[in-house]
Amino acid sequence: MKDWIEYITLFEEDIYDYIFLGFLFLAAITFPLLLVVDAPYGKLFSSSWGPTIRTDIGWIVQESPAFFLFLYFALLDKSRLKEPAYMLLSIMFLVHYLQRAFIFPLLMKTPGKPTSVIVVLSALGWNLINGYLVGRGLFHFEAKLARDWHKSPIFIIGALCWLCGFLINLHSDHILRSLRKPGEKGYKIPHGGFFRWVSCANYFGEMVEWFGWALASQSLAGALFVFWTIANLLPRAIHYHQWYIQKFSSYVTLNRKACIPFLI
C-alpha cells in the first residue's frame, strides 16, 4: 500500500510539472494578447461577449476555489502548516482570498451589475489551476523551508511587501466604491492614496502583494503567480488608463501612469 501511494505521488508530481509549464506558457502568450484585446471586464464590459451573470455572484464563483483549494492542501500536510513560516504564508494567502471572494462582493455598490460569463469561467479556471499549483507546491512538491525561515530578512521583507500591497489594494477599492453617492450614476476620476500617481492603484497593490508573498515563500508557484498577476493586470491597467484619457479631457493634466508609479 505504501509503495502504491508513493507511485501515485510521483505520478502526480509529473502531472504537476506539466501543468506548471503549461500555465507558464499560457501566461507568456496572455500578456501580449491582452495588450491588443480589451477584455470585457469592469469599465470595458460589453454585452457582445455573450451571456452575463450578476457581478457579485460571479466574483464569489470565480475567486472562492483558490481559497478552498489552498486550505485543503494546507490541512492535507499539517506537518508543514505547524511551522511559523508556513502558518504565516497561509494566513496571508487565505486573508487575501477571504476578502476577495467573500467580503469584496458584499461591499459592491452595484452587486447586480452584469459581467460576462466567459470572464467568470476564465477566472474560475485560472483560480482552480493557480490554487492547485500554489497550495500543492508549497505544502508538498517544493523544497521545504527552514524551520526558522520566518526570522530571515528575506521573509520579513516579503511579508512587509505583502502587507503594504494588501493595504494599498483595500484602500484603493474603498476609494473606488466611494466615488458615487447613493443614486448617482456615471464614472468619476478617483483621487487619493496611490491614485495620486497611477490610474489603477488597486492593481498596483495586488502586484506588490503577490511579489511579497512569492519572495517570502521562495516558491516557484508563487513566482508564477506574480508573473500571471502582471500579465493579467498590467495590460488591463493600460487599457483603463487610456479609457480615462478618452473619457475625461482633463485627465492628462494629472500626470498619472497606468499602474506602476513613475514607470508604466
Image (cartoon, grey):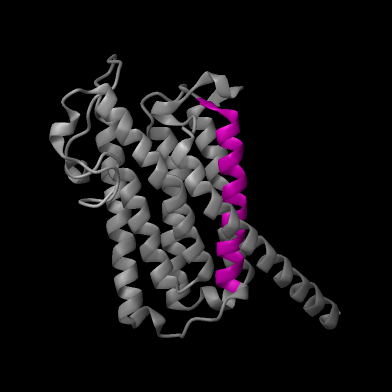
Residue at 28% in and 38% down: 174
- Is residue 107 toward the left or the right of residue 49 in the image? left
Say if 212 sits above or below 103 in the image.
below
Query: Looking at the image, how many numbered discs can be counted on the residues?
Result: 0
- Measured as percent of width and height from the top left, residue 209 is found at 36, 58
- Vertical comparison of 148 with 232: above or below: below
Specify the quadrant that holds the N terminus: bottom right
Q: Please say whether residue 69 is visible from this viewpoint.
A: no
Residue ID at (24%, 36%): 175
Q: Is residue 206 above or below residue 75?
A: above
x and y, in percent, of residue 164 in the image: 27, 58
Residue at 30% across, 31% down: 177
Give the main secondary structure of the magenta stretch.
helix
What residue span does the magenta drawing correspond to?
Answer: 115-139
Q: Residue at x 52, y 70 (%)?
A: 220
In x, y percent, where is residue 172? 27, 42
The picture places residue 62, in percent across and down from the top left corner, at: 56, 41
Residue 127 colored in magenta in the image: yes
Q: Is residue 247 magenta?
A: no
Residue 72 position by quadrant:
bottom right
Q: Is residue 234 left or right of residue 20?
A: left
Image quadrant assignment for residue 24:
bottom right
Residue 139 visible in the picture: yes
